């Protein structure tokens, strides 16, 4: 068996594929090197290229190396058979049983005949004695033997020396990549299926010019018409079943579990460095792995000299799909979220945005959007504005994430279209099934005019989300379907629509027990529970719980549920505080629904707010809103909502019921509020200090930070950065929401309506109407004094003296040397010292030396390193005849200067 040569190993493949002159010419140049090396990953076209080169030669020999050819005798045996057959020389064939020296000696006897020797799959010889023998053969062979080699990774042969000396020409994966004009020529001349230049360019982008990807696309579309084939270009991007199968068998099939895990985890980064991969995997040595992957031509490239790496687009997409299939959606999202945080910390904002989008963390996407030069998303889908896309992206995972985001935002029609787009982007049965299942649930909620009869399937759902949605639609349109209502949440909605609160409450308790923690179903149950609780629980309790739901819905990425909770909150406030500001606030949420193309939200909130107007006697506005809501309900296929309105069943939920708990006493419209931040924190309502000391330390700091900027908005990111500097984006947001909620409860308990903390967008503010704000008044008086300095000096002096009376000491001493307060504290202290100096000069000018000396001393107490204050005090004491006091002040000034290393 040792002398056997299998004919398949030395058979030259038929010349096929597109002859690419730009590559063939480099390997056949008669004046160039007679040694060539082609390196590239599987399917990059190495064998096809070399078969075309061999086809141009008069004599060509072919040897396909295999793992069993691992010693010198095996190499000699196959080279002898290949070269001897190509040259028809028996004496060379007879060298098969001899040594490498004998083969080279016999080749020298026919040095006048040119021959091309191709050695394919060179990587199979890596690290063997056959590879060492091959290096000697390359050095000693006659120049008439042109050797071309191809493999997936560089050999251990000293190619660097050969390249420097000009004895070797080398092609890599970038050279092998098809250009758009070559793709156009390939489909026209080879496949006989021409395509337009624009379609060829798009196909080149979507496959990265990968030869195997082009071939597989051709196989998948060979029976399509030209228009259908060009449309199929948009659906490829390396995601067809054929491509996935090729990668699974030829790329990932032989990897070790450790290397496979490395690829699956790090693909979430998009752009990789050794540090990022180490941090993500909690390991070390990733830089060497990345370098090895690039060296082995494993679909891994670096364009910055090894500082960062990327996987080939086709492999990247495949890995992301496999990651979700193997880990599940929830775990995959967690990996993406971790990757996004690491990318953001390293300043790779574009990659971080895409990772956050795959993690479906739309809050983070919107936060980083401005750094990409794109406006923060306002359309509700959170993707287009952030990543600069003009339509649903052609990445299947991002498209699916966008569809889910649209659905959670109430944009049903666009969500259904996005699900269809996502399905078209990946030719994978499991992915299709996932998209189709979620799309079917979304389709249930389309208006009556939307979706075909076949799409609007109301039964047969195996998953909980589908079953709950189908039953809820059955409740909203009974009689159309015979499906029984079995889920507690559907039964509770049916009871609420019937005005039967007593039945709804125990069903909601049961639904809460069935719902998964932190799920959208649990949030919906809590929201329904608060609707049922209106009139049963104290108003402030309902408002606080609704605010908790808003915060939790925002944190969970459920904007529709957040909007419904805010709308119900506004309606409850409107019942108890029916002023114009409340009317505007309640109706603004409905306008927000309409701008987000959310018909269900506009309909339901229109019913609630319209009923509130009817209860308050605003008949014209009530009829206008309720008529619009009833029309929407009919269009949406929800006649029970219209009946809910017509039979005034909703009204019963908005009034107190006999025998139940009384509503809470009205929160005072205008309590007396006093806020002090200078010299110590204090917040009193009607003369009683609120119980802020019972708050947790971070909640106390949040209250004080907002109090220090009372009435001004502070962005969420600044609050998280100052109070939770070590927290990630998600955990920091949640910590902030918990702290805001606890502060609100504290303020409500003290008698402040809505807790005093207002939120607009991603910013928070402490708003205390008509409060006596010590810090705000201090700064207002300082500004007033400067304004009247010339026109009314006496008024300016009074303002400065009053400001000094208000300045009771350092800003918020309770928080100690916290970074967020130190700079502002110093600014206010220096400002007060400057005000004191100005007041002393003015008082001295008006002849009131006693006041002038008193405020000059106050200035020095505030800023002992102020030369002007010391000099002014000494001068005033001398003018007043207090020479001993002036001498004491002089010595004090001298000590301060000495402490600073200055001359007396």
Image (cartoon, grey):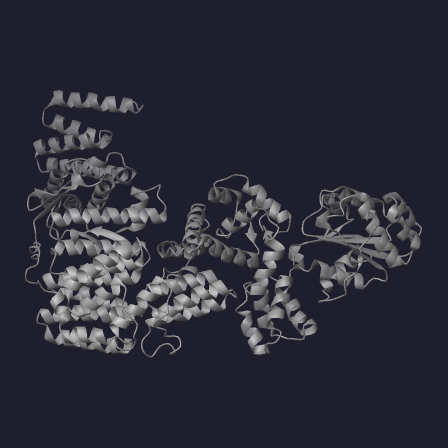
Q: In this view, does 781 lie above or below 665?
A: above
Where residue 560 appears, x then y in whole percent?
29, 63
Question: Relative to the observer, which residue lies in front, 705 or 567?
Answer: 567
Looking at the image, residue 339 lies above or below residue 837: below
Q: In the rendered image of this protein, does residue 901 appear above or below residue 479?
A: above
Query: Which image quadrant is residue 400 in?
Result: bottom left
- Placement of 752 over or under 25, stated as above or below: above
Which residue is at 19% across, 64% downward? 585
Of 382 and 500, the residue lying toward us: 500
Instruction: Please tell me how many numbered marks the rendered image carries.
Output: 0
Left or right: 225 as drawn, with respect to 764: right
Give whichever of 435, 867 is nearer the camera: 435
The reply to whether residue 299 is visible in this rendering is: no
Tell me which residue sits at (31%, 49%) in the image.
733
Residue 496 on image: x %, y %: 18, 67
Where is residue 778 shown, x and y percent of the image? 15, 43
- What residue is drawn where x is 29% and y is 59%? 521
Residue 378, quarter of the rendered image: bottom left
Q: In which quarter of the image is the C terminus?
A: top left
Q: Is residue 442 left or right of residue 189?
A: left
Q: Which residue is drawn at 29% across and 42% down?
A: 723
Evaluate whether residue 643 shows in this view: yes
Q: Where is residue 698 in the image (x, y as percent from the top left)?
A: 25, 41
The part of the image, by quadrant, that contains residue 72 is top right
User: Is residue 348 shown left or right of residue 898?
Assistant: right
């Amino acid at each position: 068996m040792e002398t056997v040569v299998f004919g398949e190993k030395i058979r030259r493949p038929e010349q096929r594929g597109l002859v690419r002159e730009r590559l063939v010419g480099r390997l056949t140049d008669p004046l160039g090197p007679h040694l060539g090396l082609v390196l590239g990953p599987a399917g990059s076209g190495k064998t096809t290229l070399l078969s075309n080169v061999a086809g141009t030669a008069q004599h060509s020999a072919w040897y396909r190396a295999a793992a069993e050819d691992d010693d010198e005798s095996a190499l000699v045996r196959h080279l002898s058979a290949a070269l001897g057959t190509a040259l028809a020389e028996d004496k060379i064939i007879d060298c098969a049983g001899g040594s490498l020296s004998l083969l080279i000696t016999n080749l020298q006897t026919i040095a006048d005949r040119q021959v091309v020797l191709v050695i394919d799959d060179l990587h199979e010889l890596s690290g063997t004695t056959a590879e060492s023998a091959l290096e000697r053969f390359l050095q000693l062979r006659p120049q008439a033997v042109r050797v071309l080699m191809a493999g997936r990774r560089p050999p251990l042969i000293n190619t660097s020396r050969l390249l420097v000396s000009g004895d070797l020409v080398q092609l890599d994966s970038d050279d092998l990549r098809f250009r758009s004009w070559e793709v156009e020529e390939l489909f026209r001349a080879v496949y006989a299926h021409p395509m337009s230049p624009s379609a060829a360019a798009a196909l080149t982008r979507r496959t990265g010019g990968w030869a195997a990807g082009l071939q597989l696309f051709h196989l998948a579309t060979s029976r399509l018409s030209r228009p259908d084939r060009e449309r199929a270009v948009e659906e490829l991007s390396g995601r067809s079943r054929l491509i996935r199968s090729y990668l699974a068998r030829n790329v990932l099939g032989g990897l070790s579990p450790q290397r496979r895990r490395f690829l699956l985890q790090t693909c979430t980064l998009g752009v990789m460095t050794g540090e990022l991969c180490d941090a993500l995997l909690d390991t070390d040595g990733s830089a060497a792995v990345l370098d090895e992957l690039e060296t082995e031509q494993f679909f891994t490239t670096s364009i910055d000299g090894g500082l960062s790496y990327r996987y080939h687009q086709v492999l990247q997409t495949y890995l992301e799909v496999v990651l979700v299939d193997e880990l599940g959606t929830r775990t995959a999202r967690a990996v993406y979220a971790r990757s996004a945080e690491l990318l953001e910390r390293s300043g790779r904002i574009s990659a971080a945005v895409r990772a956050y989008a795959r993690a479906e963390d739309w809050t983070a996407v919107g936060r980083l959007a401005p750094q990409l030069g794109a406006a923060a998303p306002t359309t509700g889908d959170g993707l287009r504005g952030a990543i600069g896309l003009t339509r649903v992206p052609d990445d299947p995972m991002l498209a699916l994430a966008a569809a889910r985001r649209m659905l959670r935002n109430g944009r049903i029609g666009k969500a259904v279209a996005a699900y269809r787009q996502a399905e078209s982007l990946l030719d994978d049965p499991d992915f299709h099934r996932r998209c189709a299942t979620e799309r079917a649930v979304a389709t249930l909620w389309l208006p009556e005019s939307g979706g075909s009869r076949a799409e609007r399937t109301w039964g047969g759902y195996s998953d909980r989300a589908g079953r709950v949605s189908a039953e809820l639609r059955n409740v909203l349109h009974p009689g159309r379907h015979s499906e029984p209502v079995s889920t507690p949440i559907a039964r509770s909605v049916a009871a609420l629509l019937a005005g039967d609160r007593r039945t709804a409450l125990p069903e909601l308790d049961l639904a809460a027990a069935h719902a998964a923690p932190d799920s959208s179903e649990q949030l919906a149950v809590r929201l329904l529970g608060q609707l049922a609780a209106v009139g049963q629980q104290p108003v402030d309790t309902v408002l606080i719980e609704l605010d908790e739901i808003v915060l939790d819905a925002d944190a969970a990425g459920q904007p529709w549920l957040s909007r419904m909770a805010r709308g119900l909150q506004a309606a409850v406030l409107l019942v108890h505080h029916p002023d114009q500001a409340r009317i505007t606030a309640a109706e603004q949420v409905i306008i927000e629904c309409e701008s987000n193309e959310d018909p269900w939200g506009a309909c339901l909130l229109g019913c609630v707010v319209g009923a509130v107007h009817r209860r308050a006697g605003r008949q014209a506005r009530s009829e206008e809103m309720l008529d619009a809501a009833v029309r929407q309900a009919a269009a949406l296929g929800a006649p029970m909502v219209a009946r809910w309105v017509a039979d005034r069943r909703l009204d019963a939920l908005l009034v107190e019921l006999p025998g139940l708990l009384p509503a809470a006493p009205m929160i005072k419209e205008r309590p007396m509020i006093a806020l002090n931040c200078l010299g110590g924190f204090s917040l009193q309502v009607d003369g009683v200090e609120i119980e802020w000391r019972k708050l947790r330390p971070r909640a106390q700091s949040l209250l004080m930070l907002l109090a220090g900027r009372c009435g001004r908005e502070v962005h969420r990111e600044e609050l998280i950065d100052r109070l939770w500097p070590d927290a990630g984006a998600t955990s920091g947001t949640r910590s902030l929401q918990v702290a805001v909620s606890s502060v609100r409860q504290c303020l409500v308990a003290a008698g402040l309506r809505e807790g005093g903390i207002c939120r607009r967008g991603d910013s928070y503010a402490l708003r205390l109407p008509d409060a006596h704000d010590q810090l705000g008044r201090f700064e207002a008086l300082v500004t007033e004094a400067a304004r009247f300095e010339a026109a009314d000096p006496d008024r300016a002096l009074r303002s400065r003296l009053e400001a000094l009376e208000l300045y009771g000491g350092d800003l918020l001493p309770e928080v100690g040397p916290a970074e967020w307060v130190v700079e502002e504290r110093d600014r206010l202290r220096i400002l007060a010292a400057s005000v004191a100096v100005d007041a002393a000069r003015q008082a001295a000018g008006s002849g009131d030396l006693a006041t002038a000396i008193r405020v000059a001393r106050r200035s020095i107490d505030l800023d002992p390193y102020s030369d002007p204050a010391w000099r002014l005090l000494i001068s005033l004491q001398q003018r007043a005849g207090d020479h001993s006091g002036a001498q004491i002040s002089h010595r004090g000034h001298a000590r301060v200067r000495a402490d600073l290393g200055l001359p007396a």
